[in-house]
Image: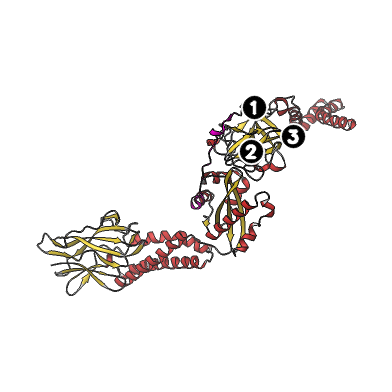
């Protein structure tokens, strides 16, 4: 053994002084001085970088061995990536490590370590307990030797819940030559609760903090604050992260959520060894006849809010990659509450899936249903009435554009309702659909609120303010009398009432209110259908407003103008989609 060590050191020394040996041999040769200098320069040019790197590597090796033996105190600074030690160490901060051999390790110190559980990464955490200490996690509190830690250095004073290695309400004794380590940002940290106790020999460096881990009385311990997860809010936060990475949005699937709840119940009931004895997640999916191509599961412990869960997921490189994967389309979330001794805590399962048959968001389906109805109504109106002051060729171009909108809306809605995957063309067309709508409205002289720039429109809630119940008989400035028919139903659960009439030499203006009395949105109302008639003929208003979008309980009041191209008496009639002519009022 001694001979081997002697040989290694001899080899290192020979390599280090090799440049000097070569230069010495050159100058001992019988060559001329110029040649000797030339050869020396040539050798330096060829081998200089190799020798310098060799010297640096040997220096680093010797320095590190001295550091490990406690001969040197400080190691070079390291760059910290991640938020598990907030607020003590920031993401991206550089910190200096000291020799654990020379300075020792006590609870409260921060250590950097590497072992089989950390893989290729060096973790940095705080030492909470040493060998021989008893550790228990109770309702978000850390107990060391039955004393509650004050934990005033943790991020936002968050509770500390267990995981697969250190579970809640179970006592553990730290083994010999080992430590219990936790991250200061407890809700995101992957520490001894997951990877187990840390052996003293795996610790590479220490930051001495001189923090005394103070304890507090039991009556001052954290109290459990129960949190019920909102799956839509959690999904929205995850989708925000996916949007930042240009990923498609996940959709909450009710079947997946049911399976996730069953999974959480299964873990709760087989707590001690659930990873071995619980159903694999794919068996649960098959049992529920849920067809999929790819699936991933993430399990959470403790009462964490939606923001804390997302932070925990994206602190892990493995989980971050899974939750940002473009393969997954659907998500399910389920929880089950476990009671163990004096502890109560939830277990939550999040399941990601790439389904064989997709599930679409109900709001998306409703959107395309509305668009199908709107484009159909618009086409019918254009083909029936045309467009005032526009020739046939211009009208035909607009009709072709709206027909394209209608085809896209019908195609996408059909695929969504039948559970068919959208093709790349469908996705491209869906993205350009809004541009087509804007183009059509611009061609028709409409704004994004479906009204012309000269038309003053006000919107108010039917529930907040009822339609004005003024007298049905209104005297105009010309001496004529306007008789209103009152508030009438013109389409399904949509009413209209003419509130006011103004008459000038060439124009008649009415103020009319449309109100949606239903619990669902509608686009079936068309101000263009409010026609001015006399005893023999009729004409539409000057405003070419083909349709109004009314949300549930919404009311819209607007002015419509008519040219006096027909002779009094005047009648205002609404031509509804069923073919009926509904009298709204008369001026005589």
Per the image, label 3 sits on a secondary structure element best described as loop
Vertical order, 37 against 317 (above or below): above
Residue at image coords 76%, 27% = 69
**Residue topped by disc 3:** 176
Label 1 or label 2, whichever lies nearer to me, is: 2
Name of the residue lying farthest toward the bottom: 536
Q: Quadrant of residue 489?
A: bottom left
Q: Nearer the viewer, residue 290 or 51?
A: 290
Q: Position of residue 402 (x, y in %)?
A: 38, 66
**Residue topped by disc 2:** 136
How many angstroms separate mark 1 from mark 2 (CA)? Answer: 25 Å
Q: Position of residue 141 (x, y in %)?
A: 58, 37
From the viewer's perspective, is 199 left or right of 453? Answer: right
**Residue topped by disc 1:** 208
Q: Quadrant of residue 42?
A: top right
Residue at image coords 26%, 63% = 496
Q: Nearer the viewer, residue 324 or 444?
A: 324
User: For the magenta stretch, what is the residue range?
Assistant: 214-234
């Amino acid at each position: 053994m001694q001979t081997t060590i002697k040989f290694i050191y001899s080899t290192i020394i020979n390599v280090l002084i090799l440049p000097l040996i070569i230069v010495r041999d050159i100058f001992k040769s019988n060559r001329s001085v110029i040649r000797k200098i030339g050869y020396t320069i040539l050798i330096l040019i060829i081998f200089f970088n190799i020798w310098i790197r060799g010297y640096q590597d040997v220096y680093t090796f010797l320095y590190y061995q001295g550091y490990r033996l406690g001969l040197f105190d400080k190691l070079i600074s390291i760059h910290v990536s991640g938020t598990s030690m907030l607020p003590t160490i920031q993401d991206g901060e550089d910190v200096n490590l000291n020799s654990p051999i020379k300075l020792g390790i006590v609870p409260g110190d921060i250590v950097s370590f590497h072992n089989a559980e950390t893989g290729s990464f060096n973790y940095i955490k705080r030492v909470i307990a040493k060998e021989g200490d008893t550790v228990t996690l109770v309702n978000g509190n850390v107990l060391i030797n039955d004393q509650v830690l004050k934990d005033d250095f943790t991020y936002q004073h968050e509770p500390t819940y267990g995981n697969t290695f250190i579970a809640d309400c179970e006592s553990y004794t730290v083994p010999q030559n080992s430590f219990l380590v936790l991250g200061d940002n407890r809700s995101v940290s992957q520490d001894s609760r997951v990877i187990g106790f840390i052996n003293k020999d795996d610790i590479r460096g220490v930051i001495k903090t001189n923090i005394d881990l103070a304890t507090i009385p039991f009556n001052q311990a954290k109290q459990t604050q129960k949190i019920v997860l909102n799956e839509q809010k959690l999904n929205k936060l995850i989708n925000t992260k996916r949007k930042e990475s240009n990923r498609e949005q996940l959709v909450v699937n009710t079947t997946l959520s049911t399976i996730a709840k069953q999974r959480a119940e299964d873990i709760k009931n087989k707590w001690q060894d659930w990873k071995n004895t619980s159903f694999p997640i794919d068996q649960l999916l098959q049992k529920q006849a849920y067809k999929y191509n790819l699936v991933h599961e993430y399990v959470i412990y403790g009462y964490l809010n939606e923001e804390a869960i997302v932070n925990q997921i994206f602190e892990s490189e493995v989980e971050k990659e899974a939750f940002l994967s473009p393969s997954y389309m659907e998500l399910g979330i389920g929880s089950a509450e476990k009671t163990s001794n004096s502890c109560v805590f939830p277990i939550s399962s999040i399941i990601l899936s790439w389904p064989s048959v997709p599930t679409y968001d109900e709001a998306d389906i409703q959107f395309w249903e509305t668009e199908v109805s709107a484009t159909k109504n618009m086409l019918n109106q254009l083909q029936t009435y045309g467009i005032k002051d526009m020739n046939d060729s211009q009208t035909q171009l607009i009709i072709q554009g709206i027909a394209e909108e209608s085809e896209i809306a019908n195609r996408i809605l059909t695929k969504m309702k039948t559970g068919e995957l959208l093709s790349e063309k469908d996705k491209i067309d869906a993205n350009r659909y809004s541009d087509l709508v804007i183009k059509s409205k611009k061609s028709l002289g409409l704004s994004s609120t479906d009204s012309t720039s000269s038309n003053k429109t006000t919107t108010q809630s039917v529930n907040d303010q009822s339609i004005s119940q003024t007298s049905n008989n209104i005297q105009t400035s010309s001496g004529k009398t306007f008789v209103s028919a009152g508030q009438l139903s013109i389409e399904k659960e949509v009413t209209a009432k003419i509130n006011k009439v103004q008459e000038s030499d060439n124009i008649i203006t009415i103020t009319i209110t449309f109100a949606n009395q239903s619990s669902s949105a509608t686009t079936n109302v068309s101000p263009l259908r409010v026609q001015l008639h006399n005893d023999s003929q009729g004409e539409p208003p000057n405003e070419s407003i083909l349709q109004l979008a009314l949300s549930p309980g919404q009311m819209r009041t607007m002015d419509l103008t008519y040219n006096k191209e027909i002779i009094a008496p005047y009648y205002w009639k609404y031509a509804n989609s069923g073919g009926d002519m509904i009298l709204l009022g008369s001026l005589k």
